[in-house]
Image (cartoon, helix red, strand yellow):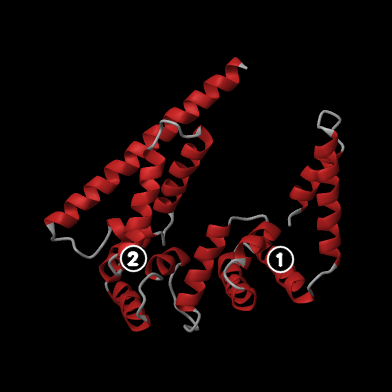
Amino acid sequence: MSNATIEKLERLANDKGATAGERANAKAAVEKLKAKRSKKDPVWESFVTEGKAAIKDRDNARWRLGELASRVEGKYGDSSLKKYAQELETNESTLKNYRSVYIAWKDQKDPRGSYSILRELAPIEDPKKRIAVLEKMKKNNEMTSRKAYEYAKRYKPPPKASEIRRYENRAARAGKSKGTDSAHHYGEAVSILKEFLTPYGNVRKLIHSQDFGSVHGTQARREILKALYDLRARVDAEISRLETGNKLN
């Protein structure tokens, strides 16, 4: 649990404007969190210390954080990365991206490529194909992240049916404006757009599937992109509405 969370609870515990019950609950939560912190796991604390040091090392931060995230996940499980990100005061999805790049290239002592290029090639699951693409790019003097992304698209597996249903359901929930809480509606839209912007997100995988020649595939991509742009427009409208309301208040 981050210091910011404890500080927030402490402010609530001392807030005279809050109810007695709210103050009591906040105070109890602070005591519980501090007691939990006192029982420190030395291995976990070591990961946190190393992670904070890595963040300060700008030249090697992404590689080091990717390695640490991989080790944390290996020892504590995938759900531990959320807590680890909180401890480091960084974004969980960022850590996961760093971890993916590290895992893809960790067996290569000197991959000899900029981090942005290696990041774009990381989704290629077959290590031999991944290395072959990198060598081909070097040979053809094509060492740009955009070119790497274009190569990687050719090797991305098509999305699973479960992934398609999951994003269809999420988009459907985000599209129900009547009788839906604004904050929930906004959050659903933001989650989809964030996933779209994530380099390893399944939405990107869906849009850039291998079936480029298929009329159905082309139409599906158009519909997905249209839905994303519509969502962005609704998010913009919601932000404007909230900002207008705040100004009036």
Above/below status of 71 relative to 244 = below
- Residue under the image location 41 percent in, 59 percent down: 199
- The image quadrant where one finds the N terminus is bottom right
Question: Measured from the top left, where is residue 179 in percent x and y?
Answer: 45, 31
Could you classify mark 1 by the number of other residues whose Cα lies within 10 Å: few (under 14), some (14-19), or many (20 or more)? some
Q: Determine which quarter of the picture holds residue 151.
A: bottom left
Q: What amino acid is found at the position of numbered circle 1 in the picture?
A: Ala
Secondary element under disc 2, as helix, strand or loop, is helix
- Residue under the image location 46 percent in, 38 percent down: 185
| Left or right, 69 with reference to 217 | right
Above/below status of 150 relative to 11 = below
Q: Which residue is mark 1?
A: 53
| Left or right, 209 with reference to 118 | left
- Residue under the image location 31 percent in, 72 percent down: 137
| Left or right, 220 with reference to 70 | left
Of mark 1 and mark 2, the one earlier in the sequence is 1
Q: Return the mark for residue 148.
A: 2
- Residue under the image location 43 percent in, 42 percent down: 189
Question: Measured from the top left, where is residue 134 in percent x and y?
Answer: 35, 75
Secondary element under disc 1, as helix, strand or loop, is helix
Do residues under tags 1 and 2 come within 8 Å of each other at their CB atoms? no
**What's the CA distance linking mark 1 and mark 2?**
30 Å
Residue 203 in sight here? no
Task: Pick whichever, 245 or 139, lies toward us.
Answer: 245
Q: What amino acid is found at the position of numbered circle 2 in the picture?
A: Ala
